[in-house]
Image: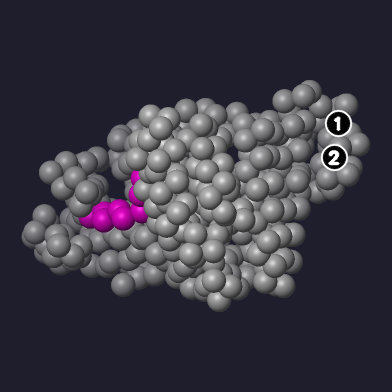
Amino acid sequence: MAIREKFQEIYGAEPEIVAQAPGRVNLIGEHIDYSDGFVLPFAISDVTKVAISRRDDAKYSIVSMQRPQHKVVVESLTPLAGEMWARYVLGTIWSLGVEGGFNILIDGRVPVGAGLSSSAALECSVAVALNQLFSLGKSRQDLARATQRAENDYVGMPCGIMDQSVSLMGHAGSALLLDCRDLSTRDIPFDVASAGMELLIIDTQAHHALVDGGYAERRASCEKAVEILGITSLRDISVEDYVARKDELDPVTYIRGYHAVTEMKRVLDTVEALAKNDFETVGRLLNESHRSLRDDYTVSCPELDEAVDTARAMGAIGARMVGGGFGGSAIALAKSSLIPTIKEGVTQSFGARGFKTPRFFTSLPSEGAHVL
């Protein structure tokens, strides 16, 4: 059932506004958005839709089409309160400062826990809808900052701003080179199909939960390195200078910061390679990114490593984990003719190791959030 019809069934009236926002895949540039780095994500075709109408009272009624019998009703916007999934909705309302109660229906089609940023898709769909419903006049950059604030201060997850930015500002056919310092963007054509290639998304179904402290601990390490080195952010030091100052940092802080400064360079190197349609170099950079995330930043897991290693063994020119880590998805860049072989190989290797059966997606860069 379409979201408008379901909304009317639940609430007895048509919604005032319907909007949608996509999940994302980050081609490269992981765990550097909160260090003012450059990142290179793109919006995917899987989206979350939201339907909203105002109420006469100050209550917030939220229903998900994925579990329509379970309605969340709250009467105040208290940070860190209420059910986790509903916090992303309530936090966005809180961050935008709009007043009054709402009836809200969510249709979330971005796989949850897969590292494809279902949370940002949820926040951004609500933000775009409220921005138009209340004629707030906020720019996409304003909305990105507001939804990041919702996740940081309301949900309690210290994420960077990449996921919200690409969900709001992505364009079909291009990856989005995002400067996380000032939120300036540049569309980078990403046409793998013309080279006879595909980007395969492998959902390991090892579902991650970033609010358990692992993400926050690593972000704190980067902030510690910045403080000790006396710089504004890790964006402001070259790889060579960072290595030269290694002795000023404890081993854990150093190696986590080393991931950040080298990953930032890999992003810019990838942009250069894409401009030349040099997909072999792009693949090498993806492989280097995964090694860094696995060994330096230590945010991988056995399922992610198995997916990456098997994809490479089956012919992928590059593969890496994506998202915050500790589970979720990996990507593999390969010739289209090899995609079925890679899928079969990963499925068999997961079965042999007793892992959950993986899921597979392919997606071209898609359009960002908008009102329907």
Q: Which residue is at a point 23% across and 55% down the rendered structure image?
A: 105
Q: Amino acid at mark 1?
A: Lys
Quadrant in which residue 121 is drawn: bottom left
| Residue marked by disc 2 | 242
View extreme (bottom): residue: 194
- The relative height of residue 170 versus residue 210 in the rendered view (above or below) is below
Q: Are marks 2 and 1 in contact (CB under 8 Å)?
A: yes
Q: Which residue is at a point 70% across and 67% down the rendered structure image?
A: 278
Question: Residue 161, percent across and down?
Answer: 56, 51
Disc 2 packing (10 Å; few <14; some 14–19; many ≥20): many
Range of the magenta residues? Answer: 104-114
Quadrant in which residue 91 is drawn: top left
Quadrant in which residue 227 is drawn: top right
Question: Is residue 107 within the magenta segment?
Answer: yes
Left or right side of 362 for 71:
left
Of residue 230 and residue 331, the one placed in the foreground of this image is 331
Q: Secondary structure at mark 1?
A: helix
Of residue 164 and residue 269, the one placed in the foreground of this image is 269
In which quadrant will I find the N terminus? bottom left
In which quadrant will I find the C terminus? bottom left
Left or right side of 48 for 151:
right
Tally of numbered discs: 2
| Residue marked by disc 1 | 246
Question: Residue 220, percent across and down?
Answer: 65, 31
Question: Residue 96, percent across and down?
Answer: 43, 54
Question: Is residue 342 within the magenta segment?
Answer: no
Distance from Cα at disc 2 to Cα at disc 1: 6 Å
Of residue 187 and residue 155, the one placed in the foreground of this image is 187
Q: Secondary structure at mark 2?
A: helix
Q: Amino acid at mark 2?
A: Tyr
Of residue 76 and residue 311, the one placed in the foreground of this image is 311
